[in-house]
Structures are given as C-alpha cells and as structure tokens.
Amino acid sequence: MENMDKLKLGAALLLVAAGVAGFYLLPADQQVLRVLAVVVGVLLAATVMWFSATGRTFVDYARDSIKEAEKVVWPSKKEVWQVTGMVFLFAFVLALFMWLVDSGLAWLFYDVLLKRG
C-alpha cells in the first residue's frame, strides 16, 4: 500500500506542475484561463491526495489543529493594551540603559584614558 501512496503523491505533484506549466504556456492575455489552469491543477492534486494515507493523515491533523485553536483563550482588549504598554516601557528603559552605558564608556575611553578633547 505504501507504493500506491507514493504513486498518488507523485501524481499529485505532476498535476500541480501541469497546472503551473499551463499557466506559463497559455497566452499572457488569457489571464482567466491561466489562473484557472493552476486552480484546476491544485484541486485535482488535492483530490488525488484525499484518497491517500498521507492526505487522510493531513486532514486528521488539520481537524485536530482547528479543535486546538478553538480552545485558545484570547486576552481582553484591556490586557492587550497593558502588555503592549509594558513592552514599550521595557524598550524605552532598555534604550535608556544602552545610551547611558554607551555614553559612560565613551567618556571613560575618550576623556579619561585617551585624554582627547
């Protein structure tokens, strides 16, 4: 059965490649047909993958991901603003600290140790 799934995966890749090739082989003034070639290639590839073990595994994974995403507890608007404020405050304090260290080291090296004016 594993060989059959490999064949299905190969067929799906070929269908996508055929859709992309159709996009480039059709005249540039036929935009609708060009896009339709890619969409049909992808849809046919998805149909082939649907009937493979890899496709079923992916669908199960996607369903589980959606269930997990529904469990997420999103922060309130107030919490978002509070955390955003803390991030900006931290960034400001860090920038101030870095400026003080830089100024202090510049003073130490240039004014004290090297006696440049």
Image (cartoon, helix red, strand yellow):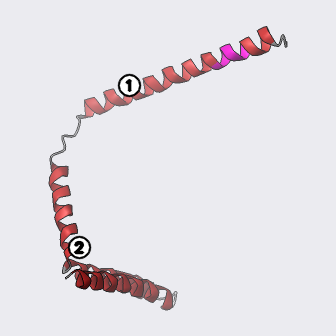
Which residue is more in the foreground, 12 or 98? 12
The image shows residue 88 at horizontal and vertical percentages of: 44, 27
**Residue at the front extreme, as displayed:** 2
Q: Which mark is residue 54?
A: 2
Q: Nearer the viewer, mark 1 or mark 2?
A: 2
Count of numbered marks: 2
Residue 4 placement (x, y as % from top left): 23, 85
| Part of the protein shown in magenta | 102-107
Residue 99 left/right relative to 73: right
Residue 17 occupies quadrant: bottom left
Q: Which residue is mark 1?
A: 86
Residue 104 colored magenta? yes
Residue type highlighted by circle 1: Met
Return the disc, 1 or 2, that comes first in the chain's sequence: 2
Specify whether 30 is left or right of 37: right
* 10 Å crowding of disc 1: few (<14), some (14-19), many (20+): few
